[in-house]
Amino acid sequence: MKRFQFRLQKLLEIREHKERLVKNELAKAERKKYIQVEKKDRMHAELDESRNKMKEEEKERLLSVERMKLYQRYFKRLGSGMKMQDKLIMIADEEIGLINEKLVEARKQRRILEKLKENKLKEYNYELQKEEQDFFDEVGNTNYIKEKSEKELQEKKETVKKKPFIPIKYREYEKNLTEKLYEELLRTGELSNDTSTK
């Protein structure tokens, strides 16, 4: 039986490659989102730090009206920046969602072919085992017939050994000899007809 070959192997390889590409696309989208989240976190940290600094200056009465206006403008700019980051993060999440859907479909398409390949391999292995079993059965039957023939031949040999072998020609010779001896005995009178009839 020839080696197992899945006739849709090339298509399976194409689908596996497509799945890898979608996984790479997903990794890039997740990295992009991570960068946006990090940026927002930095802005949030800067906002907290600036607010704490302003409170300290206010406690120490070092905060002028002009400086307070600067802080307010800075806080507003950071707030706008964080809102923008929220939008970018939301867009990144949507992109990740779409790519995840593509990945689910790519996996599904790949798994369909893999399942088909598994089933075809099971069928192939079943046929291979059946072929091997048939071969061993045939060898077993041949050996059984051979052993049986050898046993029967041995039994015949044993039977022949037990029976005394007397060739047919020898039996005819013995019969003829007995008849001749009988006739000779009758002729010489050593044996009378009365004795022979008795």
Image (cartoon, helix red, strand yellow):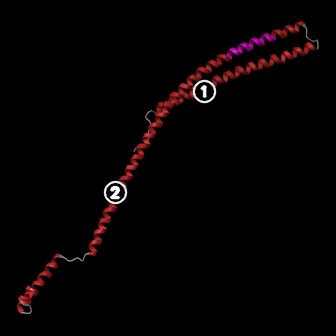
Identify the residue at horizontal 45%, vertical 39% (top origin). Answer: 121
Q: Is residue 41 left or right of residue 155?
A: right
The magenta-colored residue range is 74-88
- The location of residue 119, given as percent across then percent down, is 45, 37
Question: What residue is pinned by disc 1?
Answer: 24
Q: Quadrant of the C terminus?
A: bottom left
Identify the residue at horizontal 36%, vertical 55% (top origin). Answer: 139
Mark found first going from the N terminus, 1 or 2: 1
Q: Which disc number belongs to residue 98?
A: none
Q: Quadrant of the N terminus?
A: top left
Q: Is residue 83 magenta?
A: yes
Quarter of image, res 195: bottom left
Q: Which disc number belongs to residue 142?
A: 2
Residue 3 visible in this rendered orientation of the protein: no
**Which amino acid type is marked by label 2?**
Thr
Judged by its main secondary structure, the magenta piece is: helix
Q: Residues within 10 Å of mark 2 (few under 14, many from 20)?
A: few
**Which amino acid type is marked by label 1?**
Asn
Tag in front: 1 or 2: 2
Identify the residue at horizontal 41%, vertical 45% (top origin). Answer: 128
